[in-house]
Image (cartoon, helix red, strand yellow):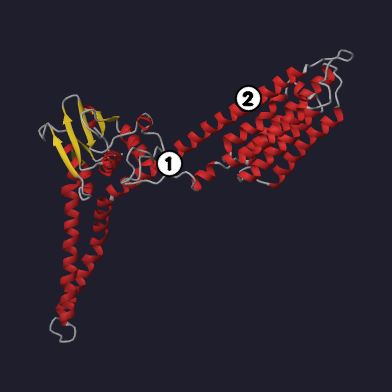
C-alpha cells in the first residue's frame, strides 16, 4: 500500500506553469496604473515630469503585451524559464520608470518587489531566486538615481541620505519576507493539492477492486446466452455424429465442455446473487480480518484483541476508504515494529475504537506534531521502512472522511507508537460504501 510522493512529477511541474493570460492581465493592470499615475502627476498636480521617456516605457510594456496576445492563445501555459524572462522584463521596465522619476524617493518604489512575489508564488525556486537577485541589483541601481522626484516647481524636496538607506532597507526586507511567505504558502498548497489528487486515485482503485465481483456476475450473465446456443448445437451434432468414428469423440468433448462452462457461470451468478449482501455488508470482525490478513507474513506477530467479541458488533457497508486507511496504518506499524503489533478493537453503544500499537522506537517528537501532513517522511527508526509520508496522509484523510477521529502518540508504558481510530457508533453502523 505504499504510495510514492508525487512532487517533482509531471503533475507538480504542470502546477508550476502559469497561464500566459494571467501575465497579460497583470501587465494591462500595470499599464493602466502607470498611465493613470502619469496623467495625474502631469495634468492634475502639474509636477515637472520627463513625460516622453515615461510614455515610451509604458508603451513598451503595452506593445510587448500586444505581441504576446497576438502570438499565443489565451490558454497557453508558460514554462518556468519563459515566465521568469517575462517577469524580468516587467521588473526592468518598472526599474527604468522609477529611475527617471526619483528612484527610491518615489513613493511607488516598493512596487519593484511585485514581480518577485509573483515569481515565488508561481515558479520553481531556482528561477525565483534568479529573479530575486535581479531585483536586488535593480533596487541598488535606483538608489543612485540622479533624477529628482516630481514635486512642486521651485520647491525642492530634500531627501536625506539616511532616509534613502532606510527606504532601500525596507524595500529589501519587504521583498525577502513576502517572497519567502509567498513561496511557502504556494508550495504547501501545491503539495496538499497533489496529495489529495493521489488520495482520490487510491480511493478509485480500491473502489474498482471492490466492484470486480459485480463485473464477474455481469460477464457470467452476458456469456450465458451464447454458451446455451453452443450447448444446443453440440447436442444436435452429437445426435447426428455421435456414432461417427471420426467426429463422435470430438463432438462429445465439445458438449461436455460447454456444459462445464455453463455450470461455472451458473455458480458465479448464484454466488453474486446469494452472497451479494454478505459481500456488501461487512461486520467489524470481518473488516479487521480482511485488513490484517495481507500483513501476517512479514515476520511480525500481529495480535488482535477483540474486547467485546462479536456480540452486538457494528455492521456497515463495505467502504474502500476504511479498508485502505486501516490497512495503511497496520502496514506502517508492521514496518516499524521490532517483534509484534497489537490491534485492540472495542465497541459499545456510543463509539467504535480501534487501537494499533507497535513495539518499535515510536515517533520522534518533532514528527509527532506533524503527522498527517503530506510528505512527512521521517521516524526514529528508518532502517526497515520506507517512511511516513503521503501514504499516511491518504490513510488519515480517508478515515476522517468516514467520520473517524485519529490520535497519534507514543506508548507511555513501553517503547513504540500508538494510533487510535474512533468512530461514533451511529456512523459506523450506517456507514455507506464510498
Location of mark 2 (residue): 174
Residue sitting at x 15%, y 71%: 256
Q: Position of residue 106 (x, y in %)?
A: 76, 22
Residue nearer the viewer, 89 or 358? 358
Residue 220 in picture, x, y percent from top left: 24, 58
Q: Residue lying furthest bottom in this view?
A: 245
Label total for image? 2
Q: Is residue 102 left or right of residue 254?
A: right
Furthest residue in direction right, as rendered: 154
Point out the tag, 2 or 1, that comes first from the N-terminus.
2
The kind of secondary structure element at disc 2 is helix
Please give the label number shown on residue 248.
Answer: none
Q: Is residue 405 above or below residue 434?
A: above
x, y percent for residue 116:
64, 33
Q: Quadrant of the C terminus?
A: top left
> What residue is rendered at 25% in x and 55% in y?
216
Image x and y of residue 183, in percent: 55, 33
Q: Quadrant of residue 319?
A: top left
Marks 2 and 1, how far apart in space?
A: 34 Å
Pointer 2 local density, CA inside 10 Å: few below 14, some 14–19, many at least 20: some
For label 1, count other residues whose C-alpha is less than 10 Å away and answer few (under 14), some (14-19) or many (20+).
Answer: some
Locate residue 282 relative to residue 12 in the image: left or right.
left
- Quarter location, residue 166: top right
Mark closer to the observer (2, 1): 2
Q: Are marks 2 and 1 in contact (CB under 8 Å)?
A: no
Residue at 25% in and 29% down: 423
* Mark 1 secondary-structure assignment: helix
Residue bearing mark 1: 197
Picture quadrant where residue 330 is located? top left
Which residue occupies 50% across, 48% down? 10
Left or right, 353 with reference to 198: left
Amino acid at each position: 500500500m505504499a504510495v510514492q510522493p508525487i512532487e517533482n512529477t509531471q503533475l507538480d511541474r504542470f502546477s508550476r506553469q502559469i497561464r500566459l493570460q494571467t501575465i497579460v492581465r497583470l501587465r494591462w493592470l500595470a499599464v493602466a496604473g502607470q498611465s493613470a499615475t502619469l496623467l495625474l502627476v502631469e495634468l492634475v498636480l502639474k509636477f515637472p515630469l520627463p513625460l516622453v521617456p515615461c510614455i515610451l516605457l509604458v508603451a513598451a510594456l503595452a506593445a510587448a503585451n500586444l505581441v504576446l496576445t497576438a502570438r499565443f492563445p489565451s490558454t497557453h501555459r508558460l514554462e518556468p524559464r519563459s515566465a521568469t524572462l517575462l517577469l524580468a522584463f516587467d521588473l526592468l521596465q518598472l526599474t527604468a520608470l522609477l529611475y527617471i522619476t526619483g528612484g527610491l524617493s518615489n513613493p511607488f518604489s516598493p512596487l519593484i518587489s511585485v514581480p518577485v512575489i509573483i515569481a515565488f508564488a508561481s515558479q520553481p525556486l531556482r528561477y525565483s531566486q534568479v529573479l530575486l537577485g535581479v531585483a536586488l541589483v535593480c533596487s541598488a541601481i535606483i538608489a543612485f538615481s540622479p533624477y529628482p522626484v516630481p514635486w512642486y516647481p521651485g520647491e525642492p524636496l530634500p531627501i536625506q541620505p539616511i532616509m534613502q538607506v532606510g527606504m532601500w532597507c525596507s524595500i529589501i526586507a519587504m521583498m525577502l519576507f513576502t517572497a519567502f511567505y509567498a513561496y511557502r504558502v504556494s508550495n504547501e498548497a501545491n503539495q496538499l493539492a497533489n496529495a489529495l489528487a493521489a488520495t482520490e486515485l487510491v480511493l478509485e482503485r480500491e473502489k474498482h477492486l471492490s466492484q470486480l465481483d459485480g463485473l464477474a456476475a455481469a460477464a457470467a450473465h452476458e456469456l450465458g446466452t451464447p454458451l446455451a446456443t453452443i450447448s444446443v448445437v453440440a447436442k444436435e451434432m452429437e445426435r447426428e455424429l455421435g456414432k461417427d468414428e471420426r467426429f463422435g469423440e470430438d463432438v462429445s468433448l465439445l458438449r461436455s465442455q460447454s456444459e462445464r462452462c455453463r455450470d461455472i457461470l451458473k455458480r458465479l451468478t448464484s454466488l453474486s446473487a446469494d452472497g451479494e449482501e454478505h459481500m456488501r455488508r461487512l461486520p467489524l470482525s470481518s473488516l479487521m480480518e480482511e485488513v490484517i490478513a495481507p500483513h501476517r507474513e512479514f515476520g511480525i506477530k500481529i495480535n488482535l484483541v477483540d474486547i467485546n467479541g462479536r456480540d452486538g458488533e457494528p455492521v456497515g457497508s463495505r467502504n474502500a476508504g476504511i479498508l485502505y486507511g486501516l490497512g495503511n496504518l497496520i502496514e506502517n506499524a508492521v514496518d516499524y515494529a521490532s517483534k509484534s503489533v497489537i490491534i485492540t478493537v472495542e465497541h459499545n453503544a456510543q463509539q467504535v475504537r480501534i487501537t494499533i500499537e507497535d513495539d518499535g522506537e515510536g515517533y520522534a517528537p518533532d514528527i509527532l506534531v506533524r503527522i498527517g501532513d503530506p510528505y512527512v517522511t521521517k521516524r526514529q527508526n528508518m532502517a526497515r521502512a520506507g517512511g511516513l509520508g503521503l501514504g499516511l496522509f491518504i490513510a488519515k484523510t480517508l478515515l476522517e472522511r468516514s467520520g473517524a477521529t485519529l490520535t497519534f502518540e507514543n506508548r507511555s508504558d513501553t517503547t513504540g507508537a500508538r494510533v487510535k481510530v474512533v468512530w461514533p457508533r451511529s456512523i459506523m453502523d450506517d456507514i455507506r460504501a464510498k
